[in-house]
Image (tube, grey):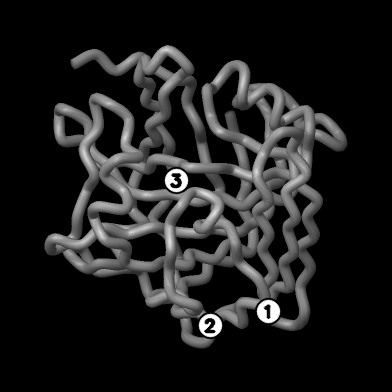
């Protein structure tokens, strides 16, 4: 699939390893940077969602999304992203992703709009039989684009080109993602509400330790493959 992501914020907090380790599926290991585990909350908008060789379909090809994630490796030491949740403002996309891609998507009421160089973002989870999870923030860039240096924490957090997920039977899957290196900008955020991590039993400080902003990136997403130990 092809997708374009807009107005993305990487909000990151260090989290005690013990808080995360029990939440990692069998077959994966929690990835650490200098002995520290991290969790991210990532709001953005998607557009142009389509099959690689097909056109975008009106209404279902553009919507807001907000994910909560951490960082893992598989038995071959391939670094990737593990999602705890992905809230989206498109019930069709949520249903398809939950059924066919085994991803923990949730229906939400969301709004993303630009205010000058900044973005005002709101999300309220509406998914049936799911706990409350809300987010409200204004965020944006405060420095020019500066790609992350290899070996840096910023590079370790963002330059990951696969995702991992498990189905209800515990079978592990891996999906490859391709895009150019992130055009990161140091950002700032005014958090007005944020229960996204708390909904997963993860307690973080009021403000993130790191904030990065990306205005736009084009992405290719491959189908899932089983991961065998």
Disc 2 vs disc 1: which is toward the camera?
2
User: On the rendered structure, is 173 left or right of 191?
Assistant: left
Q: Which is nearer the eye, 67 or 62? A: 67
Task: Identify which residue is drawn at 31% across, 53% down.
Answer: 19
Which residue corresponds to mark 3? 179
Please, what secondary structure does the residue beneath circle 2 have? strand
* Alpha-carbon span between mark 1 and mark 3: 24 Å
Of the two numbered discs 1 and 3 on the same chain, state the one appearing first in sequence. Answer: 1
Question: Circles 1 and 3: CB distance less than 8 Å?
Answer: no
Residue 151: percent from the left, percent from the top? 17, 64
Please, what secondary structure does the residue beneath circle 1 have? strand
Task: Identify which residue is drawn at 80% across, 60% down.
Answer: 111
Which part of the image, by quadrant, shows the C terminus? top left
Question: Circles 2 and 1: CB distance less than 8 Å?
Answer: no
User: On the rendered structure, is 123 left or right of 21?
Assistant: right
Which residue corresponds to mark 1? 118
Of the two numbered discs 2 and 3 on the same chain, state the one appearing first in sequence. Answer: 3
Q: Which is nearer the eye, 69 or 217? A: 69
Check residue 132 in the rendering and tell me which mark sits there, or answer none. none
* Alpha-carbon span between mark 2 and mark 1: 9 Å
Question: Circles 2 and 3: CB distance less than 8 Å?
Answer: no
Which residue corresponds to mark 2? 188
Residue 221: percent from the left, percent from the top? 50, 32
């Amino acid at each position: 699939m092809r997708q374009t992501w807009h107005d993305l914020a990487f909000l990151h907090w260090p989290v005690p390893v013990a808080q995360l380790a029990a939440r990692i599926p069998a077959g994966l290991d929690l990835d650490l940077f200098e002995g520290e585990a991290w969790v991210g909350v990532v709001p953005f908008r998607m557009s142009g969602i389509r099959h690689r060789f097909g056109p975008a379909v009106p209404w279902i090809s553009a919507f807001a999304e907000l994910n909560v994630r951490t960082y893992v490796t598989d038995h071959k030491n391939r670094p990737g992203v593990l999602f705890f949740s992905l809230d989206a403002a498109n019930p069709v996309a949520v249903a398809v992703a939950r059924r066919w891609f085994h991803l923990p998507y949730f229906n939400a009421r969301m709004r993303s709009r630009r205010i000058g160089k900044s973005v005002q973002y709101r999300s309220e989870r509406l998914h049936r039989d799911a706990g409350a999870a809300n987010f409200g923030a204004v965020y944006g860039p405060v420095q020019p684009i500066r790609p992350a240096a290899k070996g840096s924490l910023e590079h370790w957090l963002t330059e990951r080109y696969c995702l991992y997920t498990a189905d209800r039977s515990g079978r592990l899957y891996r999906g490859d993602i391709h895009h150019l290196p992130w055009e990161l900008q140091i950002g700032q955020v005014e958090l007005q509400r944020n229960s996204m991590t708390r909904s997963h039993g993860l307690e973080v400080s009021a403000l993130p330790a790191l904030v990065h902003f990306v205005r736009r990136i084009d992405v290719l997403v491959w189908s899932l493959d089983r991961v065998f130990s």
